Amino acid sequence: MLTWKIQSKNGDTKMVAHGEREVGLVSTYAYEEGDFIVLEQAEKGAYVWVQVDECLGSSLLYMEGNLYFHVPFGEKHISYAPNAFSGNRHYLYARYATKEEIGQYRNLAVNVNDSHENDSTYPHASANVETRGEAVFAARNAIDGITENHAHGEWPYASWGINRREDACFRLDFGRNVLVDKLVIYERADFPHDNWWKQLTVAFSDGTQMKCELIKTDQGQEITFAEKKIEWLELKDLIKSEEPSPFPALTQLQVFGRDII
């Protein structure tokens, strides 16, 4: 069973829709500040295609519990497309994934529905620093599926910003063991405003680490390795180039592999 709910900041349910294997909800009123979206599902450890807004598209999520998504307003909204969550008509959709979809080789990192409040649906991005606490520099931006990296700031140029921290660390949790063999890293490339990382270390949950050499480019940089079984990974020991800018940043991290089914 899948259930969409739109609730007010007080927890009052404004709209609801149910479905056995898939469910859509058309909201016909404008969101109010404090509203949040809930996707309830009855299968612990379920794989679900989730779309909280028609402007975001959908992501295949691994759900240990329910999804809670706070509708963004003000500063928190500018990391999303201008039309997202705006107006008085919205389309939410969810369905359980098929076995074939779950088992296919894919980017396991993308989650357009991720947020700070997310603690039970995966993948989930977090970090020990986000520049000035601003939404356009939040860790979630690095797994939103958008690789545009020629500027910085509001959508579509959101990124993970490190606020000049030398010990900045980005973490990606999958919520279960997965098999991975390739990363693609898109550094932000708003040159000359930006610097870039010439080296970083990837730490995996299996206890192994891998140093990666990077170049100055606006293209995705592929890093391949023997298949690993992991539950999470971290990007750490970020070493920027000798260029004068103090502002390296991560636009997107892709992690390719497959689920164990």
Image (cartoon, rainbow, N blue to C red):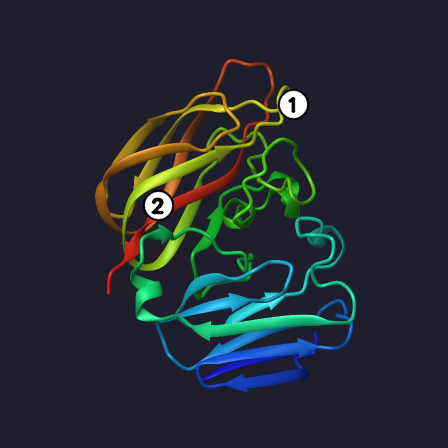
Report the residue at 51% width, 73% height from top. 94
Q: Quarter of the image for the C terminus: give it.
A: bottom left
Q: Please name whichever residue, 15 or 165, is drawn nearer the observer in this view of the structure.
A: 15
Residue visible at 38% across and 42% down?
Answer: 234
Residue 110 is labelled as none
Q: Amino acid at mark 1?
A: His
Q: Is residue 86 above or below residue 189?
A: below
Q: Does the image show residue 141?
A: yes
Q: Alpha-carbon distance for marks 1 and 2?
A: 28 Å
Across and down, in percent, residue 260 comes to 24, 61
- Mark 1 element type: loop
- Report x, y in % for residue 178: 28, 55
Q: Where is residue 145 shown, x and y percent of the image?
A: 52, 48
Tell me the residue that label 2 is attached to: 233
Residue 193: give its label: 1
Q: Which of the 4 image quadrants contains residue 89? A: bottom right
In this rendered view, identify the residue nearer to me: 225 or 77: 225
Q: Quadrant of the N terminus?
A: bottom left
Name the residue furthest front: 100
Kindly identify the residue that appears in the image at 70 percent across and 43 percent down: 154
Of labels 1 and 2, earlier in sequence is 1
Residue at the limit of the structure toward the left, as seen here: 226
Task: Name the amino acid type tagged 2.
Answer: Leu
Numbered circles on residues, count: 2
Q: Nearer the viewer, mark 1 or mark 2?
A: 1
Image point 76% across, 55% down: which residue?
74
